[in-house]
Image (cartoon, rainbow, N blue to C red):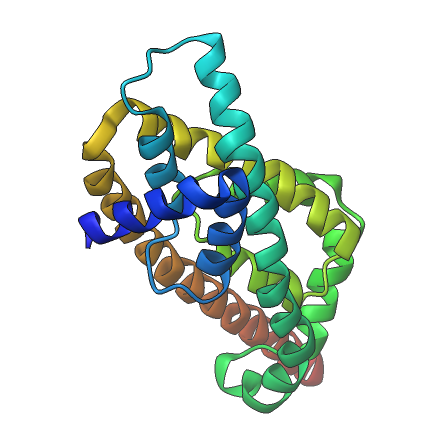
Amino acid sequence: MFEGIILYLESILAVYGPFGVFIASIVEEVIAPIPSTLVIMGTSFVVLKGSAISLDGFINLFFNIVLPASLGVTLGSLFVYGIGYFAGKPFIERWGKYLGVSWEDIEKAEEKFENSHSDEILLFMVRAIPVIPSVAISAFCGIIRFDLVKYVIITFLGTMVRAFILGFIGWQFGSMYQSVADEISYLEEITVAVISIAVILYFIYKKKLKKSKTLNKASS
């Protein structure tokens, strides 16, 4: 798999340059069944291998990898955001009762995000951390119908930080980056599972708490 991905990235970069990174990032974000770290880390390895840490190296990293990758991921994430936006409500209304969550809960979460700048900072931070899966964030923002303009800006800025971290790892660790990418992808999978369970347990707790309050009022 490693050799095939490297050959693919080298062919894309040879023909399209930074635009190839942009296209590959869109594909990887939307449909590609490969770890989300490989495009950025792989292109960094291909473009910057053998280069010493220098100002020119960082400029090369930014314009050839970080910037096009951030634009690609942001654009590609809109597809997942759109699915969450349009399919989230029907899904919650049909299946939410089995998960202990209602559309009213989602609307409250949406209102909370709209009225809190701390949540915008939190969104930026989870976008910037490599082990937080991008798809899960995009879907969540779509489901709660997070403001689209804010979403695009925060996603782009957060992804730039993420892309710089991953790009630097690919640059400095050379061919070892594949094992690092595999570890990050494994942590992403664990994070998805933990977040999903935590969200479900949270809404179940809220539902039981609400039911308990209702029963207490009725008995008093």
Q: In which quarter of the image is residue 177?
A: top left
Tell how many labels: 0
- Residue 38 visible here: no
* Figure check: 9 above or below 109: above
The residue under the point 63% across, 80% down is: 87
Furthest-top residue in this view = 54
Furthest-bottom residue in this view = 94
* Figure check: 103 above or below 156: below
Q: In this view, does 178 lie to the left or right of 127?
A: left
- Front-lying residue, 90 or 29: 29
The residue under the point 41% across, 47% down is: 12
| Quadrant location of the N terminus in the rendered image | bottom left
The residue under the point 34% across, 42% down is: 10
| Quadrant location of the C terminus in the rendered image | bottom right
Q: Is residue 166 left or right of residue 136?
A: left
Q: Where is residue 4 in the image (x, y as percent from the top left)?
A: 22, 53
Q: Where is residue 107 in the image (x, y as percent from the top left)?
A: 74, 69
